[in-house]
Amino acid sequence: MAMLRHREFHKAPVPTGLLYSSRSLEDVIYREELDAMAQRDPNLHVFHTLTRKQPDGWAGHRGRIDKAMSKPNIFVCGPTSFVEHVSSVLVELGHDAFAIKTERFGPTGG
């Protein structure tokens, strides 16, 4: 929580995801503060998983944090040279090449 408070205090624009595992929604510590932070900051995403008890209509993750939940989806869109460069950097940083989805575009004809 201290890291998120520090990030918010300094208005850090870095995209951030928090994977938060709890037994039930009632067991989420700092729930109101986290919800408020996420509402104020479009670059902060809080993902809850509930391991034991889910409220009616729960559409979130069920069970413990697993490989599927922690695998990022990465989307890169732009001119071909940009997409190739960014994709290469992401792979060098250790991201799975199959998790990188790309869309390329170039100049229009004429």
Image (cartoon, rainbow, N blue to C red):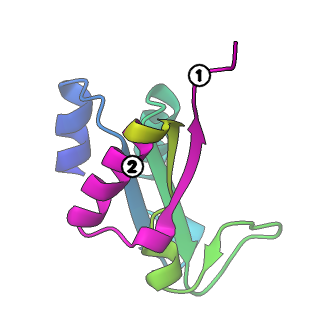
Q: Which residue is mark 2?
A: 84
Amino acid type of the residue tagged 1 in the rendering: Pro
Q: Can residue 89 be found in the magenta stretch?
A: yes
Of residues 51 and 18, the one drawn nearer to the viewer in this rendering: 18
- Answer with the quarter of the image where residue 57 lies: bottom right
Location of residue 103 by image quarter: top right
* Helix, strand or loop at mark 2: helix
Specify whether 39 is left or right of 5.
right
User: Which residue ends up furthest to the top in the rendered image?
Assistant: 110
Nearer to us in this view, 31 or 14: 14
Residue linked to disc 1: 107
| Residue 5 seen in the figure | yes
**Mark 2, other Cα within 10 Å: few <14 / some 14–19 / many ≥20:** some
Front-most of 109 and 58? 109
- The residue at 43%/30% (across/down) is 41
Q: Whole-percent x and y of residue 101?
A: 55, 57
Name which residue type carries label 2. Answer: Glu
Vertical placement of 110 versus 43: above or below?
above
In the image, 73 versus 3, the foreground residue is 73
Q: Quadrant of residue 58?
A: bottom right
Left/right placement of residue 27 relative to residue 105 reads left
Q: Position of residue 90 (x, y in %)?
A: 30, 57
- Residue 29 in sight in this render: no
Q: CA distance from mark 1 to mark 2?
A: 16 Å
Report the magenta residues as a range. 82-110
Where is 12 relative to 29, above or below? above
